[in-house]
Amino acid sequence: MIQENIHLLACPRCRGKLRIERVQLKCLGCAATYPVDQDGIPLLFCPTEGWNKDRDVTEVVKAFYEKNPFPNYDDLESRESLEHKASRGIFARLLNEQIPAGSLVLEVGCGTGQLTNFLGMSWKRQVFGSDVCLNSLRLAKGFRDRFSINNAAFLQMNLFRPGFRDSIFDVVISNGVLHHTGDPYRAFQSIAQLVKPGGIILIGLYNRIGRLTTDFRRFLFRMTHDHLKFLDGHMRNRQYNEPRKRAWFMDQYKHPHESKHGMGEVIEWFEACGFEYLITIPKIDGSLFTANERLFEPHCKGNRLSRFLTEVEMLLEGGVDGALFITIGRRVCEDTFVGQKPAEARDSAALKG
């Protein structure tokens, strides 16, 4: 699929076109070359430049996931088992059902690629998965190759230096990723530019209030040398095998870097970068998220009080699934405000108007 879609790729250094030369990709602009590893994964990773070294955590996070791939495939033995696992969650099922036919989809920070492979089982779309961790990508592509998931493909890249052209994807997904970067808003701007006008972006982030439960458990685990793991419901789940439990525990409680965000803050990101707000999960207007929810239609974005109450509810529920909340938007403006904060971007838009 990479060969058939080489026109979609771009040099992460100069944004030039790439061409295939034997077992590598070469930029037609700056002549940079990028190898393809023995498993057939293009290695388009390019280090972030122009940052304070103390702020850029890309290499630290990359090293963590090389040792601790998340999630793992130990409990998945077939296409059917992956489909069953994904479909048990309402969100994954709705996403699979509602992505329009013919869509070009990118999952940024795909990890071991379970969502990419699940969405790639459909003949109606093509799905790319990208990540910084080569070990995770090898697990993803191994599953893809074993079960002939021909509409999924994987490559290594740094989301701050994308290996794709701008404005080409119908859907860009980055769930549980941006909060592990040194600058989540800049990371959002970077991947937002890959969405075509009218296309969809979906991001999942840790909530600043709902995550307090996880923070408290992390403190207890550290103080007791991890002897109180049973306080996390995932560690008590008898349906989980030990590798799956370990992957969850490491990702949630031993990660070297994470940030937490408010629902209103993320809505500001969307509006600053030319995206119409569609929905947040959990919903922030006080209504319930249902099994028939329309993910790509505009919903009420509530107000400060309703968002705060939703975040408090996440806390009172014990920070389920790490207190991750998902926000979806549609690109309505071709211009993005690169390098600006949301408030500055709104001022720029007002001046243009």
Image (tube, grey):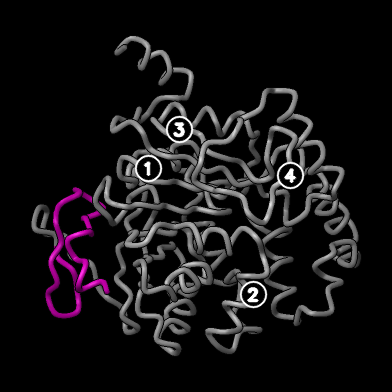
Residue 248 point in image, percent of width and height: 70, 67
Secondary structure, mark 2, is helix
Residue 151 figure quarter: bottom left
Q: Nearer the viewer, mark 4 or mark 2?
A: 4
Circle 1: is it few (<14), some (14-19), or many (20+) Cα within 10 Å? some
Residue 85 point in image, percent of width and height: 64, 75
Q: Is label 4 in contact with label 3 (beta carbons under 8 Å)? A: no
Q: Earlier in the sequence, mark 4 or mark 3?
A: 3
Residues under labels 4 and 3: Cα distance? 21 Å
Name the residue located 74 percent from the left edge and 44 percent from the top edge.
288
Q: Which residues are magenta?
A: 1-26
Q: Earlier in the sequence, mark 1 or mark 4?
A: 1
Residues under labels 1 and 3: Cα distance? 17 Å
Which amino acid type is shown beneath numbered disc 4? Leu
Residue 213 point in image, percent of width and height: 83, 47
Q: Which residue is mark 1?
A: 190
Q: Which residue is mark 2?
A: 85
Q: Is label 1 in contact with label 4 (beta carbons under 8 Å)? A: no
Secondary structure, mark 3, is strand
Circle 4: is it few (<14), some (14-19), or many (20+) Cα within 10 Å? few
Q: In the displayed structure, would residue 226 be above or below residue 341?
A: below
Q: In the displayed structure, would residue 126 be above or below residue 50?
A: below
Q: Nearer the viewer, mark 2 or mark 1?
A: 2
Q: Which residue is mark 3?
A: 276
